[in-house]
Image: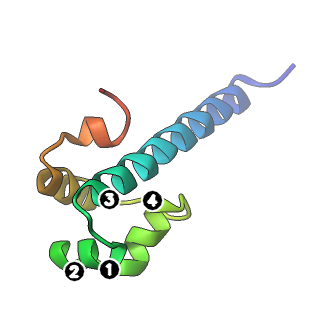
Amino acid sequence: MYSNEYSQAFFCNILYNFFMKVFAERLKELRLEKELSQRGLAKLLNLSAQAVSQWENESRTPNAEAVAVIAKFFGVSADYLLGLED
């Protein structure tokens, strides 16, 4: 059998992947609703276009400050962005 430590790590990895997938989908959806390019959103929020692209492609994780800035800009909660509420 697998150790409890392995099971916890596996479960955490599944949750992390879920939250990042939801974040990527919701970020792109909200950005497109405002008819913004990745570069346009990045400029408005003083972020790099590369970061926005990587978040939408799930290849980079946003920090808490970035999530808060994005949530405030779009008028949604951080919980919504991360898939913790609909």
Amino acid beneath label 1:
Arg
Q: Which residue is mark 4?
A: 61
The quarter holding residue 6 reads top right
User: What separation in Å lies between label 4 and label 3 (alpha carbons)?
Assistant: 20 Å
Q: In front here: 53 or 18?
A: 53
Of the numbered discs 4 and 3, the one sitting upstream in the chain is 3
Q: Residue at x 44, y 52 (%)?
A: 24
Amino acid beneath label 3:
Leu
Of the numbered discs 1 and 4, the one sitting upstream in the chain is 1
> Taking 86 as reference, is 13 left or right?
right
> Taking 86 as reference, is 5 left or right?
right
User: What separation in Å lies between label 1 and label 3 (alpha carbons)?
Assistant: 12 Å
Please state the horizontal and vertical placement of residue 27, each as a whole percent of the image: 35, 53
Q: Which residue is mark 1?
A: 39
The answer to whether the residue labelled 1 contacts the one labelled 4, judged by CB atoms less than 8 Å apart, is: no
Q: How many marks?
A: 4
Q: Residue at x 62, y 29 (%)?
A: 11
Residue 32 got which mark?
Answer: 3
Please state the horizontal and vertical placement of residue 81, each as a whole percent of the image: 31, 43
Tag 2, which secondary structure? helix
User: What separation in Å lies between label 1 and label 2 (alpha carbons)?
Assistant: 6 Å
Tag 4, which secondary structure? loop
User: What separation in Å lies between label 1 and label 4 (alpha carbons)?
Assistant: 18 Å
